[in-house]
Image (tube, rainbow, N blue to C red):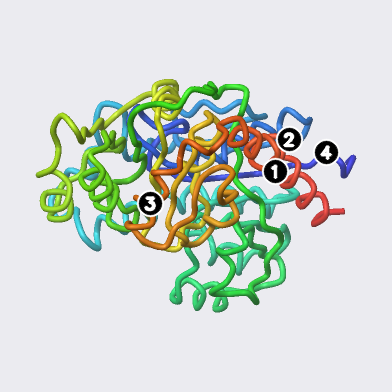
């Protein structure tokens, strides 16, 4: 076999199809598809393990007959049965993923693959630890908190490697078997650009405390600026108390948009607010916004200093107060520089380049 042409297997989730139903936002899936399709275009044999109904432009899609737990028109009956919740529900979600993983590793044992690229790291570690005839590469999409670091060390073996999506992501566990830092990328060709500054602020993401939507609302209230909040509808005390009471003409929530609509919202904004309250591993929102020309104002957490060029493509701040101050000088940002920053550092082609290089280095 020509070793320059790799046989790669990859997997993200068994919970829903790839791509997911309209309205489901799942960044790891976007990255996995972009990498897999990019490697397939370069002549590598890519097998993508996903539930029935998935449509990915790779060599083949393998489902093993698995139906997605969450389907376009609802959920499988198995999730609607009695006593399915809490621990029992978690078991179902885990086992659905592990069915696809077991198919991958069965193929590895049969000599069908040169490398396995896996995104649900927590559910795959026991397989990678036990079956060592093929390198397993995990792309980490979450912060490496203490319990994760402990588990990664527990299951450590020389055939398992980790890809970080920012250098900051490595800090809690610098001694893991890191393969490389590979920044996430987007297809810049599909992203519209505007040199003209818009007239509203934008927040995009999950509407949870760690993403800082309440802080974005605070910025809007204190400045009088219009704010659009884009993210799937949620319930719970955080939303009901910190965000919902302030919705109206000035602060609006839009729950579901298409990818094309999303980029139009980015393009027409004055600035995108990223007031994160956690150690952000990467932050696709930042590069999506900058690609359209819209600068980003973000709290200094996690990957932010690696993504934003302070004073050139946005501002890195320490507090909501500094975020408000940064808005006063947002006019000084050249929107063309925002686009150039993404073109030079965060494209799909660059991302695929790095994965291809690192995968070849493992098997040659």
Residue 1, x across and y down, in percent: 88, 41
Residue 74 visible in the snapshot: yes
Disc on the earlier residue, 2 or 1: 1
Residue 134, x across and y down, in percent: 72, 57
To which quarter of the image does residue 139 belong? Answer: bottom right
- Mark 1 sits on what residue? 8
- Mark 3 sits on what residue? 325
Residue 64 visible in the snapshot: no
Disc on the earlier residue, 4 or 2: 4
**Label 4, label 2: how many angstroms apart (C-alpha)?**
7 Å
* Tag shown at residue 5: 4
Q: Judging from the image, what secondary structure is the residue with disc 1 in?
A: strand
**Label 3, label 4: how many angstroms apart (C-alpha)?**
52 Å
Q: Is residue 175 above or below residue 298?
A: below
Q: Is residue 55 above or below residue 357?
A: above
Which one is nearer the viewer's eye here, 232 or 93? 232
Which numbered disc, 3 or 1, marks the residue closer to the eye?
3
Residue 291, x across and y down, in percent: 56, 32
**Label 2, label 1: how many angstroms apart (C-alpha)?**
6 Å
């Amino acid at each position: 076999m020509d070793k320059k042409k790799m046989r790669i297997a990859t997997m993200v989730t068994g919970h829903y199809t790839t791509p997911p139903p309209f309205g489901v936002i799942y960044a790891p899936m976007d990255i996995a598809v972009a990498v897999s399709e990019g490697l397939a275009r370069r002549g590598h044999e890519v097998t993508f393990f996903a539930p029935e109904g998935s449509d990915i432009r790779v060599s083949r899609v393998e489902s093993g007959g698995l139906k997605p737990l969450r389907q376009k028109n609802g959920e499988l009956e198995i999730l609607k049965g009695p006593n399915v919740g809490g621990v029992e529900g978690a078991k179902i979600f885990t086992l659905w993923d592990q069915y696809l993983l077991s198919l991958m590793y069965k193929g590895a044992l049969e000599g069908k693959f040169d490398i396995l690229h896996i995104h649900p790291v927590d559910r795959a570690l026991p397989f990678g630890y036990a079956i060592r005839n093929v390198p397993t590469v995990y792309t980490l999409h979450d912060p490496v908190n203490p319990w994760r670091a402990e588990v990664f060390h527990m299951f450590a073996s020389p055939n398992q490697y980790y890809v970080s999506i920012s250098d900051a992501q490595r800090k809690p566990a610098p001694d893991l078997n890191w393969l490389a830092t590979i920044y996430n990328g987007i297809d810049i060709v599909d992203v519209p650009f505007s040199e003209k500054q818009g007239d509203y602020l934008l927040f995009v993401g999950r509407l949870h405390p760690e993403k800082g939507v309440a802080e974005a609302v605070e910025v809007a209230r204190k400045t009088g600026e219009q704010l659009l909040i884009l993210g799937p509808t949620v319930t719970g005390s955080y939303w009901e108390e910190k965000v919902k009471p302030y919705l109206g003409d000035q602060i609006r929530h839009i729950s579901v948009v298409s990818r094309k609509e999303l980029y139009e919202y980015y393009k027409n904004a004055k600035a995108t607010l990223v007031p994160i309250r956690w150690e952000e591993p990467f932050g696709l929102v930042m590069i999506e916004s900058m690609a359209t020309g819209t600068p980003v104002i973000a709290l200094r957490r996690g990957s932010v200093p690696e993504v934003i060029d302070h004073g050139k493509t946005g501002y890195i701040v320490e507090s909501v107060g500094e975020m408000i101050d940064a808005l006063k000088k947002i006019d000084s940002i050249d929107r063309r520089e925002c686009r150039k920053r993404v073109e030079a550092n965060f494209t799909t082609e660059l991302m695929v380049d790095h994965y291809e290089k690192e995968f070849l280095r493992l098997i040659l």
